[in-house]
Amino acid sequence: MTEPADPTDRLARVTLDGMSLTRLSPELEADRAQAVADLTHESNFAPPGFKGPFVLHLAIVEGRLVFDIRNEKDEKLIAHALALGPFRGLIKDYQMLVDSHISSVHEGREDRIQAIDMGRRGLHNEGAEMMTARLAEKINIDFPTARRLFTLVCVLHQRI
């Protein structure tokens, strides 16, 4: 991944707001934890007109994906809400692949696991492209950051 032009254009912390995460399967919890760790370790996230590092509170509210962006003191800077509708098909397909992956692991079907992982990567790429396009002019992000944010959107969607 390329370094941000400004080293402060990054996420220092990411939280998923709303219901507790107790309903997540172990696989989705692992995806959530990995995406958050990756975003806080290395991301390119820059809402125009603001200096980071940033704290992101991500939530689904009334069918909208809300990016509540704050400074490191957790003081609100700006919020953006995106309609969740365009993501729903990808989220549904992602969940089907996660479920298929789980059953394939239990069955020990290595060839099927590899095919599912390829499909999952493709969905992540498609979700990242959509995320980047939908956030254009609101938040500057790179492709790896968009992929990780898409993972979190999928996790959030499973909680509603």
Image (tube, rainbow, N blue to C red):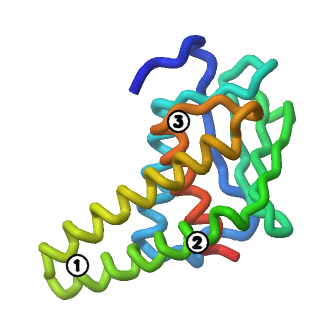
Mark 2 residue element: helix
Write down the quadrant of residue 99 in the picture: bottom left
Q: Position of residue 63 (x, y in %)?
A: 80, 68
Q: Residue at x 54, y 43 (%)?
A: 146
Residue tagged 2: 89
Q: Quadrant of the N terminus?
A: top left
- Kind of residue sitting beneath label 1: Val
Q: Is residue 130 left or right of residue 66?
A: left
Disc nearest the viewer among 1 and 3:
1
Quick one: label 1, few (<14), some, or many (20+) residues within 10 Å?
few
Q: Position of residue 43 (x, y in %)?
A: 52, 31
The front one of 152 and 142 is 142
Mark 3 residue element: helix
Sequence-first disc among 1 and 3: 3
Disc 2 vs disc 1: Cβ atoms closer than 8 Å? Answer: no
The front one of 77 and 128 is 128
Residue tagged 1: 105
Disc nearest the viewer among 2 and 1:
2
Q: Residue at x 57, y 65 (%)?
A: 155
Residue tagged 3: 40
- Kind of residue sitting beneath label 2: Gly
Q: Position of residue 92 (x, y in %)?
A: 54, 75
CA gap, disc 2 and disc 3: 28 Å
Mark 1 residue element: helix
Q: Quadrant of the C terminus?
A: bottom right
Write down the quadrant of residue 102 in the picture: bottom left
Q: Position of residue 28 (x, y in %)?
A: 47, 68
Quick one: label 3, few (<14), some, or many (20+) residues within 10 Å?
some
Disc nearest the viewer among 2 and 3:
2
The front one of 112 and 152 is 112
Quick one: label 2, few (<14), some, or many (20+) residues within 10 Å?
few
